[in-house]
Image (tube, grey):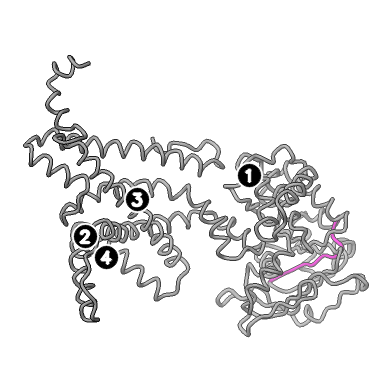
Amino acid sequence: MEGLITASGLGPALDLLALSPPGWGGNLLRGLVNSMQIALGAFGLGLLIGLLGAYGKLYGGPVIRDLLAVYTTIVRAVPELILILILYFAVTDALNQFLVAQGYGRIQISGVVAGIAVLGVVQGAYATEVLRGAILAVPAGQIEAARAFGMPPLMLARRITLPAMLAFALPGLANLWLIATKDTALLAVVGFGELTLETRQAAGSTKAYFTFFVAAGLLYLLISLISGRVFGWLERRARRGEPGAGGGGR
Amino acid sequence: MGQAAAETFPDLPPDQPEAIRIDDLRKSFGMIEVLRGVSLRACEGDVVAIIGGSGSGKSTLLRCINFLETPTSGRIVIGGEEIALRPDGTPASRRQIERARRSLGMVFQQFNLWSHRTILENLIEVPVHVLGVPRTEAVARAMSLLTRVGLAEKAGAYPAFLSGGQQQRAAIARALAIDPRAMLFDEPTSALDPELVGEVLNVIRDLAAEGRTMILVTHEMNFAREVASHVIYLHNGVIEEQGPPASLFGAPRSDRLKKFLKSVS
């Protein structure tokens, strides 16, 4: 094994990727953890916004529907990078001006909170549409049957509509999750230490660009592969009532 | 249409408590008036069959009883409790509607079983989560109902793996699982292959024989004649003729009913 690594010329690269200094592997993994933290938070926040947004668009009054249309249109039209810059700098600035005007001190928003908030708002717009479509795909008769048996609206959503729409929503949600994991890289522009920024710093310090960016790429790939498995399992579970269903995550 | 509203129900035994009563029900979809003043009464143990051509309003009438359709005007009394309506016909209280619905077991043309739940889960869903029946009790009752409709071995299967006839029998068992005051059947055999109709009708026949109160919208004239205690012929949103099955099918008075019966036989 030792000889093989030396012969392949991978030795110096592996030294650079060692988990403890002078290797940079620990930095990369820390970046990965930060990225995952933000991706998970943003995806969760996006799901919550998406759920409320989908129900609002389907059953809300005209004002709510219009507001939601504005939200999904703008967020989906503007590049994520610009949204991140707007929300991170402009919103923080506005918040601080407001706080100062009210006689409070300025605050520094943490990168994780800002990242989750920004990407969550972006994810929420897409999730609204994914979930709206999935809810519409649930056979109307099944919802009607629940109403006919006197199920109150919230229980109906929790017991019937949401579990039944999951099968239709999961392919779209899997996409959103993968996008969330990769959109975390955009937070590098605001100086947040996620995987891409850590990689750039490691590469810049050592001039081993190829090694570090390939390593980061492999880490992103690993996340995708694991996610595919998890979503495949979830989708098979959600579709367990359908004969001959399959294909999720493959 | 005034004639329909004023019609009495001489053939119904007056000593039974009233299960469902509808007075002068009207329902419009936009400009089209689908029900134009229909009155109906079902006492405990009655089997009321509603027949009529397509577009006669018979399904709408049935769906107004549990407010799947909101009537435009009229009175609906379920188990002696009048459903409070606003002047525009919409229910005044969601809770009252929900309470009324929990006493009415509805069976749909398209079965409408919940596809993400097994047959047993379909049967215990409403008892456990809506009515608060303890799970073990609900499961025991569900299993005995499934045995009764011949589906005990399908308890763990998902609806999509059952034939149409089996699904409809399961849907009837689901409606029975709430121990309803009355059963509402909306063309329960119309979506079935002809060879599967019999097994569903047998189950409904059993229910009629044990004295279940039922309101049944159907195209099966022979079946209506056999099980119904009272038959209503609906045409263009009004009751054209009604009475015991023997007289309605044996000696129809109105020309429209004569023509209708000829066309479906």
Marks 4 and 2: same chain?
Answer: yes
Callout in the foreground (4, 2): 2
Location of residue A30 in the rendering, given as x and y in whole percent from the top left corner = 24, 43
Query: Label 2 lies in what chain?
Result: A
Question: What secondary structure is marked by label 2?
Answer: helix
Residue B118 has which mark? 1
The quarter of the picture where residue A90 lies is: bottom left
- Cα separation, mark 1 vs mark 4, equals 42 Å
Query: Label 4 lies in what chain?
Result: A
**Three-letter amino acid code at the position of disc 4:** Ile
Location of residue B111 in the rendering, given as x and y in whole percent from the top left corner = 65, 52
Query: Label 1 lies in what chain?
Result: B
Q: Callout 4: few (<14), some (14-19), or many (20+) C-alpha neighbours within 10 Å?
A: some
In the image, residue A250 sits, relative to residue A181, either above or below, namely: above
Marks 1 and 4: same chain?
Answer: no
Asked if disc 1 and disc 4 are in contact, CB closer than 8 Å, the reply is no
**Three-letter amino acid code at the position of disc 1:** Thr
| Residue at which label 2 appears | A84
Callout in the foreground (2, 1): 2
Question: What secondary structure is marked by label 1?
Answer: loop
Q: Earlier in the sequence, mark 4 or mark 2?
A: 4
The quarter of the picture where residue B4 lies is: bottom right
| Residue at which label 4 appears | A74
- Cα separation, mark 2 vs mark 1, equals 45 Å
Query: Label 3 lies in what chain?
Result: A
